[in-house]
Structure formats: structure tokens, C-alpha cells
Amino acid sequence: MMTLTNNELKKSDLLRAICNELQLEDYCVAGNIKELNIDSYRCTGAIDYYAHADAFTSIILDLNLHEDLQIAIPSHNSKMLYLLYVTDGNLYHQLKSSTEVFKIEPFKTVALAPHLLDNHLLTFRRGSQLKCNLISVNYTQLLNYFEIKDNLESHDFNGVIDIIEKMGSELFECGFNLKIAKQLKIIEAHRSMPTLSSNLMREGRMSIILSIYLDQLTTHIKGDSNEYAITGGEIKKIKAVSDYIVENPGLNHAQSKLCSKFYISQSKLQFGFKIVHKTTVSNFTRQIRLKKSEFLLNNSDLNISEIVYTVGFTSRSYFSKIFKEKYGCNPTAYRQNFKNSKLEEESKR
């Protein structure tokens, strides 16, 4: 265990505020990734912290709160943007100068910019498991780090920055997004794995999450998004349907059956998948089945026909056709290429 230094705390106002509120000091440090397991009278659970140079920091909270937790994001004049995302639990936002309280809906992306004249207050309510992601972005450092400040590629984001800087103390609510929840779930599965590959994977996933945030924020500000046409309850059902398909690729996922099982209309199911996954239910199912078939080709002794029916396809010829379209060769050749690559790696050891 190692005590978090003042210099490290300065990298994240959110981290400092949470540490102060919970009276926490000890962190397990692994490069830019810090992990804290908590068992106190205030809460139990875990906090993961990741810092990418001076460009952005990310905090993942997985807490069971025994009492309400409130933190203040200090006002300052640095080029900062905060991005909030809740998967479980109750998170509320208000300005210190106001009594108006805003609940941040699960699976909905929210952005806010600190203002010199006010403080943002975040209140985490007790009573249920809290899972959320809090990212602070120094967008000047971010653009400088990737050396795109004056490139055409940064123009869209520069337009977003102009709007952010005019936001004042406003909280900017974007639409629903399950892609972030998916990435956070992968990171959670690799938590506390003290390996280089695991840390590299988590570091990469954090960058992916930030790119999803910024892409959604850019799209929404430009007016190219219509996420508000679906409710929070409906988005939870879409997530449940998505998880069900991923966990059971071999079942018959006819839309009528999914609608009946999850009590959602077919129009909302179709619309929800287009909003959340940018594709149809059938195409999402097909891609999940192909991904599962790839795993079985590389990690099982099942023959091709057995794999076809295990993942839910009914025609081997159709499976081979779409597999080749995605992976560039038929399933038999893919399996052989994988075996050859594995033998080659083992011979070099």
C-alpha cells in the first residue's frame, strides 16, 4: 500500500474531493492505475483511478453507501470538462448557489464545465449499489498531447469546446449510451489483475470510453442525435435484451419472442437498438454469434457443424459465407491459421 501524494491528488479535483469526503489515504499503485478497496462506516466497495498524462483522469466508483456522500467540484479557470455516467444507483447534481436538484439517469451521458462563479455539487445517495464513471478532461492538454490542435481533425471538437466554454454553470445532458457500460463491464472483469497485459487493456479501454463520450457529445451538440425519443426505462430493457443475446447466442432471438420476454414493443426494440448499438437487432445477434464462433474455433475441439448449431445458425453454408465476409477466410482456414500462429509462437519461446 502507498499513500497518495498531494501532487497525485492535484491531477484530479474529483479524486481529491472523494478522498477528503471519505477520509481515505492509502492506495495500491500500479503505474497510472490506482485501486482502493474500501470497508468503512461510510461505505464499502472499490474506487479505481486512471490518469492519462495531464490530458484526462477517470474514476470508477463501485460503492455500497451507508450514508449520503456529497462532493464539490471546485471552480477554476482551467480548460476542464467533466463527464459523468451512471450504470447503477442514484447520483444527483446541483449548483451550490441553487436549490434545484437534477437526477442523472443511468446509462445517460452528462457533461459539465466548472464555472468561476459557482460550485458543482454531486450527491451520491445511499440505499443501493452505486456504480458510475467520472472523467475529468483538460481539453487543451488533450489536443496538445495528440498534436491535433491545428489539424482539420480537431475542428469538430473545437466547435464543441466553444459551446462548452459558453455553458457557464449549466449541466449538459446527452442521450443514452450502452457502449460505455459495455467497456466499464470489461474493465471491471480485469480489476486487480496484476499483469502488464491487463493494465494495458484497461488503459486502452479508458481511452475508448473517453472517445465514446466525446463522439456522443460532439454529435449531440451538432444536433445529429435523437436519443431523447427513448426513455430511461426503455433503455434498461434494451440493455437487458442485449445482455441476454450476448449470454445466449445459440437461442432463437426472434423479435416477437424478445418483445414478449422483456415487455417491450417491437417498434421500441428496433428503435432502441438503432440508438444504442447503431444497428438492427438481427445484425447485432449475427455479430454476437460470429464473435462466439470465432472463440469456439480457437478454443474448442468442436467441428464446424457443431459450432454452427451451438451459436444459433441453421445453415453451415450461410455461416461460412458471412464468416468469410467478416474475417477474410472460411472457418476451416481461420482455425488452421490460428493453430499455425500458435505453434510458431511456441517455437520461438
Image (cartoon, grey):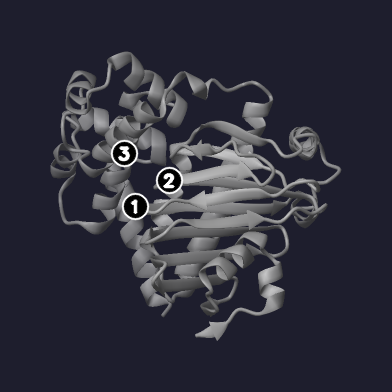
Q: Is residue 208 visible?
A: no
Q: Is residue 234 above or below residue 295?
A: above
Tag 2 secondary structure: loop
Q: Is residue 130 left or right of residue 118?
A: left
Instruction: Residue at 22%, 28% (x, y): give it.
Output: 262
Quarter where residue 348 is shown:
bottom left
Q: Amino acid at mark 3?
A: Ile
Instruction: Residue at 62%, 60% (x, y): give it.
Output: 14
First-in-chain label (1 vs 3)? 1
Instruction: Residue at 22%, 22% (x, y): give it.
Output: 259
Residue 127 marker: 1
Q: CA distance from mark 1 to mark 2?
A: 9 Å
Q: Is residue 178 visible?
A: yes
Q: Is residue 29 above or below residue 43?
A: below
Give yes or no for contact between labels 1 and 2 (Cβ–Cβ under 8 Å).
yes
Residue 263 marker: none
Classify the position of the C terminus by image quarter: bottom left
Q: CA distance from mark 1 to mark 3?
A: 35 Å
Q: Is residue 39 above or below residue 252?
A: below
Q: In x, y percent, where is residue 89?
A: 39, 47
Q: Is residue 236 left or right of residue 84?
A: left
First-in-chain label (3 vs 2)? 2
Q: Is residue 293 above or below residue 235?
A: below
Q: In x, y percent, where is residue 196?
A: 49, 73
Tag 3 secondary structure: helix
Residue tagged 2: 90
Residue 288 marker: 3
